[in-house]
Image (cartoon, rainbow, N blue to C red):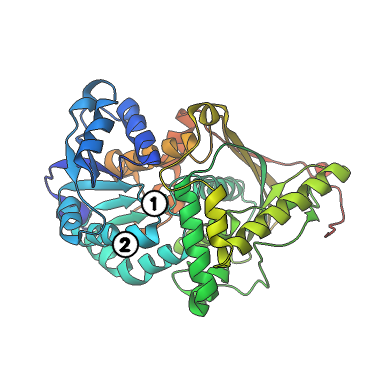
Protein backbone atom coordinates (compact mmCIF):
# COMPACT_ATOMS: atom_id res chain seq x y z
CA UNK A 1 0.00 0.00 0.00
CA UNK A 2 1.15 3.48 -0.84
CA UNK A 3 -0.90 5.47 1.69
CA UNK A 4 1.80 6.12 4.25
CA UNK A 5 4.16 7.38 1.54
CA UNK A 6 1.53 9.72 0.16
CA UNK A 7 0.67 11.05 3.62
CA UNK A 8 4.18 12.03 4.65
CA UNK A 9 4.34 14.58 7.47
CA UNK A 10 0.98 16.30 7.59
CA UNK A 11 -0.35 19.08 9.75
CA UNK A 12 -2.98 16.93 11.50
CA UNK A 13 -3.33 13.29 12.44
CA UNK A 14 -7.12 13.34 12.58
CA UNK A 15 -9.79 15.84 11.53
CA UNK A 16 -13.42 15.65 12.67
CA UNK A 17 -15.52 17.02 9.82
CA UNK A 18 -18.98 18.15 10.92
CA UNK A 19 -17.92 18.79 14.50
CA UNK A 20 -20.78 21.26 15.09
CA UNK A 21 -23.53 18.76 14.23
CA UNK A 22 -25.33 16.63 16.78
CA UNK A 23 -23.22 13.49 16.33
CA UNK A 24 -20.13 15.57 15.55
CA UNK A 25 -20.25 17.16 18.99
CA UNK A 26 -20.62 13.75 20.65
CA UNK A 27 -17.69 12.44 18.60
CA UNK A 28 -15.49 15.40 19.52
CA UNK A 29 -16.26 14.89 23.20
CA UNK A 30 -15.51 11.17 22.89
CA UNK A 31 -12.14 11.81 21.25
CA UNK A 32 -11.29 14.48 23.84
CA UNK A 33 -11.68 11.81 26.52
CA UNK A 34 -10.18 8.80 24.73
CA UNK A 35 -7.59 9.89 22.18
CA UNK A 36 -3.91 9.75 23.20
CA UNK A 37 -2.48 13.14 24.10
CA UNK A 38 0.11 13.04 21.31
CA UNK A 39 -2.47 12.98 18.52
CA UNK A 40 -2.91 16.20 16.56
CA UNK A 41 -6.68 16.53 16.23
CA UNK A 42 -8.59 19.33 14.53
CA UNK A 43 -12.29 20.23 14.32
CA UNK A 44 -13.70 21.12 10.91
CA UNK A 45 -16.96 22.55 9.61
CA UNK A 46 -18.40 25.49 7.75
CA UNK A 47 -18.98 27.87 10.69
CA UNK A 48 -15.89 29.04 12.58
CA UNK A 49 -17.80 30.56 15.49
CA UNK A 50 -19.72 27.34 16.11
CA UNK A 51 -16.51 25.32 15.85
CA UNK A 52 -14.97 27.50 18.53
CA UNK A 53 -18.04 26.97 20.73
CA UNK A 54 -17.68 23.20 20.39
CA UNK A 55 -13.99 23.41 21.18
CA UNK A 56 -14.69 25.54 24.28
CA UNK A 57 -17.05 22.84 25.58
CA UNK A 58 -14.35 20.16 25.51
CA UNK A 59 -12.16 19.18 28.47
CA UNK A 60 -8.45 19.71 28.99
CA UNK A 61 -6.03 19.97 26.09
CA UNK A 62 -8.84 19.56 23.54
CA UNK A 63 -9.65 23.21 24.09
CA UNK A 64 -6.48 23.96 22.14
CA UNK A 65 -7.38 21.87 19.10
CA UNK A 66 -7.23 23.93 15.89
CA UNK A 67 -10.38 24.60 13.89
CA UNK A 68 -10.56 24.31 10.12
CA UNK A 69 -13.27 26.03 8.09
CA UNK A 70 -14.48 23.95 5.15
CA UNK A 71 -17.86 23.57 3.47
CA UNK A 72 -19.02 20.33 1.84
CA UNK A 73 -19.89 22.39 -1.28
CA UNK A 74 -16.39 23.88 -1.61
CA UNK A 75 -14.28 21.26 -3.36
CA UNK A 76 -11.05 23.28 -3.14
CA UNK A 77 -11.46 23.53 0.64
CA UNK A 78 -12.14 19.79 0.88
CA UNK A 79 -9.04 19.04 -1.17
CA UNK A 80 -6.92 21.18 1.15
CA UNK A 81 -8.47 19.52 4.18
CA UNK A 82 -7.75 16.02 2.86
CA UNK A 83 -4.12 16.88 2.10
CA UNK A 84 -3.62 18.34 5.58
CA UNK A 85 -4.36 15.21 7.60
CA UNK A 86 -3.76 11.48 7.81
CA UNK A 87 -7.37 10.63 8.68
CA UNK A 88 -10.75 12.34 8.24
CA UNK A 89 -13.84 11.20 10.11
CA UNK A 90 -17.07 12.77 8.90
CA UNK A 91 -20.55 12.99 10.38
CA UNK A 92 -21.96 15.27 7.66
CA UNK A 93 -24.97 13.63 6.04
CA UNK A 94 -26.99 12.81 4.10
CA UNK A 95 -23.83 11.50 2.51
CA UNK A 96 -25.36 11.27 -0.95
CA UNK A 97 -25.72 15.06 -0.76
CA UNK A 98 -22.70 16.08 1.33
CA UNK A 99 -20.21 13.21 1.39
CA UNK A 100 -18.79 12.45 -2.02
CA UNK A 101 -16.58 15.52 -2.44
CA UNK A 102 -14.73 14.78 0.79
CA UNK A 103 -14.45 11.06 0.09
CA UNK A 104 -13.06 11.81 -3.36
CA UNK A 105 -10.54 14.27 -1.95
CA UNK A 106 -9.39 11.66 0.57
CA UNK A 107 -9.09 8.97 -2.10
CA UNK A 108 -6.90 11.23 -4.25
CA UNK A 109 -4.74 12.39 -1.31
CA UNK A 110 -4.20 8.91 0.15
CA UNK A 111 -6.02 10.02 3.31
CA UNK A 112 -7.99 7.50 5.33
CA UNK A 113 -11.71 8.26 5.70
CA UNK A 114 -14.48 7.02 8.01
CA UNK A 115 -18.17 7.86 8.00
CA UNK A 116 -21.58 6.89 9.41
CA UNK A 117 -23.52 6.39 6.23
CA UNK A 118 -26.47 4.03 6.03
CA UNK A 119 -27.10 4.82 2.36
CA UNK A 120 -26.72 1.98 -0.14
CA UNK A 121 -26.68 4.29 -3.16
CA UNK A 122 -23.90 6.42 -1.68
CA UNK A 123 -21.65 3.45 -0.93
CA UNK A 124 -22.33 2.05 -4.40
CA UNK A 125 -21.17 5.35 -5.91
CA UNK A 126 -17.98 5.28 -3.83
CA UNK A 127 -17.23 1.77 -5.07
CA UNK A 128 -17.91 2.65 -8.69
CA UNK A 129 -16.03 5.93 -8.80
CA UNK A 130 -13.34 5.86 -6.08
CA UNK A 131 -12.26 2.25 -5.59
CA UNK A 132 -9.42 2.31 -8.11
CA UNK A 133 -8.13 5.71 -6.97
CA UNK A 134 -8.12 4.67 -3.31
CA UNK A 135 -6.34 1.42 -4.12
CA UNK A 136 -3.70 3.36 -6.04
CA UNK A 137 -3.06 5.86 -3.22
CA UNK A 138 -3.53 3.42 -0.33
CA UNK A 139 -6.53 5.26 1.13
CA UNK A 140 -8.94 3.29 3.27
CA UNK A 141 -12.45 4.65 2.74
CA UNK A 142 -14.40 2.96 5.52
CA UNK A 143 -18.16 3.38 5.48
CA UNK A 144 -20.85 2.50 8.05
CA UNK A 145 -18.77 2.93 11.21
CA UNK A 146 -21.69 3.43 13.60
CA UNK A 147 -24.77 1.46 14.62
CA UNK A 148 -25.07 1.08 10.86
CA UNK A 149 -23.25 -1.33 10.52
CA UNK A 150 -20.58 -2.17 13.12
CA UNK A 151 -22.66 -4.57 15.28
CA UNK A 152 -23.84 -6.53 12.24
CA UNK A 153 -20.47 -6.59 10.49
CA UNK A 154 -18.35 -7.46 13.52
CA UNK A 155 -20.96 -9.91 14.83
CA UNK A 156 -20.69 -12.00 11.66
CA UNK A 157 -16.91 -11.62 11.68
CA UNK A 158 -16.53 -13.11 15.16
CA UNK A 159 -18.92 -15.94 14.24
CA UNK A 160 -16.76 -16.74 11.23
CA UNK A 161 -13.54 -16.60 13.23
CA UNK A 162 -14.87 -18.95 15.91
CA UNK A 163 -16.26 -21.46 13.39
CA UNK A 164 -12.97 -21.42 11.47
CA UNK A 165 -10.95 -21.91 14.67
CA UNK A 166 -13.15 -24.89 15.58
CA UNK A 167 -12.89 -26.42 12.12
CA UNK A 168 -16.68 -26.22 11.87
CA UNK A 169 -16.80 -25.19 8.23
CA UNK A 170 -18.28 -22.22 6.42
CA UNK A 171 -21.20 -20.18 7.69
CA UNK A 172 -24.54 -21.00 6.08
CA UNK A 173 -27.91 -19.66 7.26
CA UNK A 174 -27.21 -16.74 9.61
CA UNK A 175 -29.82 -14.56 11.31
CA UNK A 176 -29.38 -11.44 13.40
CA UNK A 177 -32.21 -10.85 15.88
CA UNK A 178 -32.50 -7.44 17.50
CA UNK A 179 -33.50 -8.46 21.02
CA UNK A 180 -33.29 -5.06 22.72
CA UNK A 181 -33.19 -1.57 21.26
CA UNK A 182 -33.76 1.57 23.31
CA UNK A 183 -32.76 5.08 22.30
CA UNK A 184 -33.62 8.08 20.17
CA UNK A 185 -33.44 9.02 16.51
CA UNK A 186 -31.94 12.17 15.05
CA UNK A 187 -33.03 14.42 12.25
CA UNK A 188 -29.90 13.58 10.29
CA UNK A 189 -30.77 9.89 10.23
CA UNK A 190 -34.32 10.68 9.15
CA UNK A 191 -33.08 13.01 6.42
CA UNK A 192 -30.76 10.33 5.03
CA UNK A 193 -33.59 7.78 4.95
CA UNK A 194 -35.94 10.26 3.31
CA UNK A 195 -33.46 11.15 0.57
CA UNK A 196 -32.61 7.56 -0.33
CA UNK A 197 -36.22 6.33 -0.30
CA UNK A 198 -37.30 9.28 -2.47
CA UNK A 199 -34.52 8.60 -5.00
CA UNK A 200 -35.36 4.91 -5.19
CA UNK A 201 -39.05 5.72 -5.64
CA UNK A 202 -38.41 8.09 -8.54
CA UNK A 203 -35.53 6.34 -10.31
CA UNK A 204 -35.90 2.77 -11.58
CA UNK A 205 -32.14 2.18 -11.81
CA UNK A 206 -31.63 3.38 -8.24
CA UNK A 207 -34.52 1.22 -7.05
CA UNK A 208 -32.94 -1.83 -8.68
CA UNK A 209 -29.70 -1.21 -6.80
CA UNK A 210 -31.45 -0.69 -3.47
CA UNK A 211 -33.43 -3.93 -3.84
CA UNK A 212 -30.45 -6.06 -4.90
CA UNK A 213 -29.17 -8.10 -1.91
CA UNK A 214 -25.67 -7.92 -3.42
CA UNK A 215 -25.88 -4.22 -4.27
CA UNK A 216 -22.46 -3.52 -2.75
CA UNK A 217 -20.62 -6.51 -4.13
CA UNK A 218 -17.26 -5.74 -5.78
CA UNK A 219 -18.20 -8.23 -8.53
CA UNK A 220 -21.93 -8.85 -8.82
CA UNK A 221 -21.55 -11.60 -11.40
CA UNK A 222 -19.33 -13.62 -9.06
CA UNK A 223 -21.92 -13.81 -6.28
CA UNK A 224 -23.55 -17.17 -5.58
CA UNK A 225 -27.16 -17.88 -6.56
CA UNK A 226 -28.85 -18.58 -3.23
CA UNK A 227 -32.44 -17.79 -4.10
CA UNK A 228 -34.48 -14.84 -2.97
CA UNK A 229 -33.08 -12.96 0.03
CA UNK A 230 -35.68 -10.45 1.16
CA UNK A 231 -34.98 -7.84 3.83
CA UNK A 232 -38.53 -6.61 4.34
CA UNK A 233 -41.23 -9.19 4.80
CA UNK A 234 -44.21 -9.87 6.97
CA UNK A 235 -44.55 -11.13 10.49
CA UNK A 236 -43.14 -14.59 11.15
CA UNK A 237 -42.06 -16.87 13.96
CA UNK A 238 -38.35 -17.68 14.15
CA UNK A 239 -37.80 -21.43 14.16
CA UNK A 240 -34.80 -21.48 16.49
CA UNK A 241 -35.97 -19.08 19.19
CA UNK A 242 -39.76 -19.19 19.03
CA UNK A 243 -39.79 -15.40 18.81
CA UNK A 244 -42.27 -13.57 16.65
CA UNK A 245 -40.31 -11.25 14.41
CA UNK A 246 -40.81 -8.14 12.31
CA UNK A 247 -38.62 -6.40 9.73
CA UNK A 248 -35.65 -4.47 11.12
CA UNK A 249 -35.57 -1.02 9.56
CA UNK A 250 -31.78 -1.06 9.07
CA UNK A 251 -31.61 -4.54 7.53
CA UNK A 252 -31.69 -3.34 3.93
CA UNK A 253 -28.38 -1.57 4.48
CA UNK A 254 -26.64 -3.75 7.06
CA UNK A 255 -27.12 -6.94 5.06
CA UNK A 256 -25.42 -5.38 2.04
CA UNK A 257 -22.43 -4.33 4.14
CA UNK A 258 -22.07 -7.83 5.59
CA UNK A 259 -22.29 -9.42 2.14
CA UNK A 260 -19.68 -6.97 0.86
CA UNK A 261 -17.38 -8.05 3.69
CA UNK A 262 -17.79 -11.65 2.63
CA UNK A 263 -17.02 -10.80 -1.00
CA UNK A 264 -14.01 -8.60 -0.19
CA UNK A 265 -12.46 -11.49 1.75
CA UNK A 266 -12.88 -13.93 -1.15
CA UNK A 267 -16.14 -15.29 0.31
CA UNK A 268 -14.31 -16.37 3.45
CA UNK A 269 -17.60 -16.73 5.33
CA UNK A 270 -18.73 -19.22 2.69
CA UNK A 271 -20.39 -19.32 -0.71
CA UNK A 272 -23.57 -20.69 0.88
CA UNK A 273 -23.68 -17.84 3.40
CA UNK A 274 -27.22 -16.48 3.64
CA UNK A 275 -27.81 -13.52 5.95
CA UNK A 276 -30.83 -11.66 7.24
CA UNK A 277 -31.77 -9.31 10.09
CA UNK A 278 -35.04 -9.27 12.04
CA UNK A 279 -36.56 -7.54 15.06
CA UNK A 280 -37.54 -9.92 17.87
CA UNK A 281 -40.93 -9.03 19.37
CA UNK A 282 -41.58 -11.77 21.93
CA UNK A 283 -43.44 -15.06 22.14
CA UNK A 284 -47.10 -15.94 22.22
CA UNK A 285 -50.03 -13.85 21.15
CA UNK A 286 -48.55 -10.66 22.63
CA UNK A 287 -45.37 -11.13 20.61
CA UNK A 288 -47.36 -11.74 17.45
CA UNK A 289 -49.38 -8.54 17.94
CA UNK A 290 -46.24 -6.55 18.71
CA UNK A 291 -44.56 -7.89 15.58
CA UNK A 292 -47.59 -6.94 13.50
CA UNK A 293 -47.49 -3.40 14.90
CA UNK A 294 -43.76 -3.00 14.24
CA UNK A 295 -44.12 -4.38 10.72
CA UNK A 296 -46.98 -2.00 9.98
CA UNK A 297 -44.99 0.93 11.35
CA UNK A 298 -41.93 0.16 9.22
CA UNK A 299 -44.08 -0.25 6.14
CA UNK A 300 -45.95 2.99 6.76
CA UNK A 301 -42.67 4.90 7.23
CA UNK A 302 -41.22 3.64 3.95
CA UNK A 303 -44.42 4.28 2.01
CA UNK A 304 -44.76 7.73 3.56
CA UNK A 305 -41.22 8.68 2.61
CA UNK A 306 -41.63 7.35 -0.92
CA UNK A 307 -44.85 9.28 -1.61
CA UNK A 308 -44.26 12.96 -2.49
CA UNK A 309 -47.70 13.81 -1.10
CA UNK A 310 -47.11 12.35 2.37
CA UNK A 311 -43.37 13.14 2.62
CA UNK A 312 -43.95 16.73 3.84
CA UNK A 313 -46.41 15.48 6.47
CA UNK A 314 -43.77 13.19 7.96
CA UNK A 315 -41.51 16.22 8.21
CA UNK A 316 -43.98 17.74 10.67
CA UNK A 317 -43.69 14.87 13.15
CA UNK A 318 -40.17 13.50 12.63
CA UNK A 319 -37.07 15.32 13.95
CA UNK A 320 -35.27 17.78 11.68
CA UNK A 321 -31.55 17.67 10.74
CA UNK A 322 -29.40 18.81 13.65
CA UNK A 323 -31.82 17.47 16.24
CA UNK A 324 -31.25 14.42 18.39
CA UNK A 325 -32.28 12.69 21.60
CA UNK A 326 -31.77 14.27 25.01
CA UNK A 327 -28.87 13.38 27.28
CA UNK A 328 -31.28 11.41 29.47
CA UNK A 329 -32.50 9.33 26.52
CA UNK A 330 -28.92 8.69 25.42
CA UNK A 331 -27.89 7.69 28.92
CA UNK A 332 -30.72 5.20 29.34
CA UNK A 333 -30.35 3.67 25.88
CA UNK A 334 -29.08 0.18 25.12
CA UNK A 335 -29.04 -2.50 22.47
CA UNK A 336 -28.57 -6.26 22.27
CA UNK A 337 -28.25 -8.25 19.06
CA UNK A 338 -28.03 -12.02 18.83
CA UNK A 339 -26.60 -13.65 15.71
CA UNK A 340 -27.16 -17.35 15.13
CA UNK A 341 -25.52 -19.39 12.42
CA UNK A 342 -25.45 -22.97 11.21
CA UNK A 343 -22.17 -24.05 9.64
CA UNK A 344 -21.55 -26.40 6.74
CA UNK A 345 -20.83 -29.19 9.23
CA UNK A 346 -24.13 -28.62 11.04
CA UNK A 347 -22.66 -26.97 14.14
CA UNK A 348 -24.45 -23.95 15.54
CA UNK A 349 -23.08 -20.81 17.14
CA UNK A 350 -24.49 -17.77 18.89
CA UNK A 351 -22.82 -14.35 18.90
CA UNK A 352 -23.99 -11.49 21.10
CA UNK A 353 -23.24 -7.84 20.34
CA UNK A 354 -24.52 -5.42 22.98
CA UNK A 355 -23.86 -2.19 24.84
CA UNK A 356 -25.44 -0.16 27.63
CA UNK A 357 -25.67 3.02 25.58
CA UNK A 358 -28.08 4.66 23.17
CA UNK A 359 -27.33 2.83 19.89
CA UNK A 360 -27.67 5.70 17.43
CA UNK A 361 -25.75 8.31 19.40
CA UNK A 362 -23.85 7.38 22.58
CA UNK A 363 -22.82 3.96 21.24
CA UNK A 364 -22.34 5.28 17.72
CA UNK A 365 -20.01 8.01 18.97
CA UNK A 366 -17.89 5.31 20.63
CA UNK A 367 -17.87 3.10 17.53
CA UNK A 368 -16.94 5.96 15.21
CA UNK A 369 -14.27 7.31 17.57
CA UNK A 370 -12.67 3.88 17.94
CA UNK A 371 -12.82 3.36 14.17
CA UNK A 372 -10.99 6.65 13.64
CA UNK A 373 -8.41 5.71 16.27
CA UNK A 374 -7.89 2.38 14.50
CA UNK A 375 -6.97 4.30 11.35
CA UNK A 376 -4.65 6.77 13.03
CA UNK A 377 -3.10 4.65 15.81
CA UNK A 378 -3.29 1.02 14.67
CA UNK A 379 -2.50 1.18 10.96
CA UNK A 380 0.36 -1.37 11.09
CA UNK A 381 -2.00 -3.93 12.66
CA UNK A 382 -4.89 -3.46 10.24
CA UNK A 383 -5.59 -5.80 7.31
CA UNK A 384 -3.49 -4.78 4.31
CA UNK A 385 -6.37 -3.47 2.22
CA UNK A 386 -7.20 -0.17 0.55
CA UNK A 387 -10.26 1.08 -1.28
CA UNK A 388 -13.90 1.26 -0.20
CA UNK A 389 -14.02 -0.98 2.86
CA UNK A 390 -16.42 -2.20 5.52
CA UNK A 391 -15.67 -2.10 9.26
CA UNK A 392 -14.92 -5.84 9.30
CA UNK A 393 -12.56 -5.73 6.32
CA UNK A 394 -10.85 -2.50 7.33
CA UNK A 395 -10.39 -3.14 11.06
CA UNK A 396 -11.06 -6.80 11.84
CA UNK A 397 -9.99 -7.88 15.32
CA UNK A 398 -8.45 -4.50 16.09
CA UNK A 399 -11.84 -2.80 16.37
CA UNK A 400 -13.31 -5.81 18.17
CA UNK A 401 -10.62 -5.46 20.84
CA UNK A 402 -11.09 -1.70 21.15
CA UNK A 403 -14.85 -2.03 21.63
CA UNK A 404 -14.47 -4.76 24.23
CA UNK A 405 -12.24 -2.41 26.20
CA UNK A 406 -15.06 0.15 26.01
CA UNK A 407 -17.47 -2.33 27.68
CA UNK A 408 -19.16 -3.52 24.51
CA UNK A 409 -20.18 -7.17 24.55
CA UNK A 410 -18.84 -9.18 21.60
CA UNK A 411 -19.02 -12.87 22.46
CA UNK A 412 -19.43 -16.19 20.66
CA UNK A 413 -20.44 -19.57 22.02
CA UNK A 414 -21.34 -22.87 20.45
CA UNK A 415 -24.92 -23.87 21.07
CA UNK A 416 -25.63 -27.46 22.15
CA UNK A 417 -27.72 -29.37 19.68
CA UNK A 418 -30.46 -30.02 22.28
CA UNK A 419 -31.29 -26.29 22.36
CA UNK A 420 -32.59 -26.46 18.82
CA UNK A 421 -36.01 -28.02 18.72
CA UNK A 422 -38.00 -27.80 15.50
CA UNK A 423 -40.54 -24.99 15.41
CA UNK A 424 -42.75 -24.03 12.55
CA UNK A 425 -42.48 -20.63 10.92
CA UNK A 426 -45.72 -18.78 10.38
CA UNK A 427 -46.56 -15.59 8.57
CA UNK A 428 -49.27 -13.15 9.37
Q: Position of residue 387 (x, y in %)?
A: 33, 61
Q: Tell me if residue 340 can be seen.
A: yes
In the rendered image, which residue does mark 1 sit on? 394
Q: Residue at x 46, y 56 (%)?
A: 192
Q: Quadrant of residue 212?
A: bottom right
Mark 2 or mark 1: name the one nearer the start of the chain: 2
Q: Position of residue 266 (x, y in %)?
A: 48, 64
Above or below residue 277? Residue 123 is below
The label on residue 405 is none
In the rendered image, which residue does mark 2 sit on? 100
Above or below residue 190? Residue 65 is above
Q: Quadrant of the N terminus?
A: bottom left
Q: Residue at x 33, y 42 (%)?
A: 372
Above or below residue 418? Residue 63 is above
- What is the secondary structure assignment of the residue under circle 2? helix
Q: Position of residue 178 (x, y in %)?
A: 66, 44
- What is the secondary structure assignment of the residue under circle 1? helix
Q: Tell me if residue 266 can be seen.
A: no
Taking 178 as reference, is 161 left or right?
left
Q: Quadrant of residue 44?
A: top left
Q: Nearer the viewer, residue 382 or 47?
A: 47
Taking 125 as reference, is 38 left or right?
left
Q: Quadrant of the C terminus?
A: bottom right
Q: How many marks?
A: 2
Foreground label between 2 and 1: 2
Q: CA distance from mark 2 to mark 1?
A: 19 Å
Amino acid sequence: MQGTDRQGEREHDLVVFGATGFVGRLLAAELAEQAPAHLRIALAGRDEARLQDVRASLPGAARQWPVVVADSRDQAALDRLARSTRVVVTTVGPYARHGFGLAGACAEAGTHYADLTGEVLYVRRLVDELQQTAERTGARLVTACGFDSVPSDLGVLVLHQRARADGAGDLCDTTLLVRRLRGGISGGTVDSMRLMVAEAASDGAARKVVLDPYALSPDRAAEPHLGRQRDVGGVMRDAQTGQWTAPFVMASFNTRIVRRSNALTGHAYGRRFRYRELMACGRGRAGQLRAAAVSAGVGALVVGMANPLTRPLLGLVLPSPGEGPSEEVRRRGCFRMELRTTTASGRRYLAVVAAQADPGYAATAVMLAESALCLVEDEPRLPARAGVLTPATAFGDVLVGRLRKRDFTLTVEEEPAERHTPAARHSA
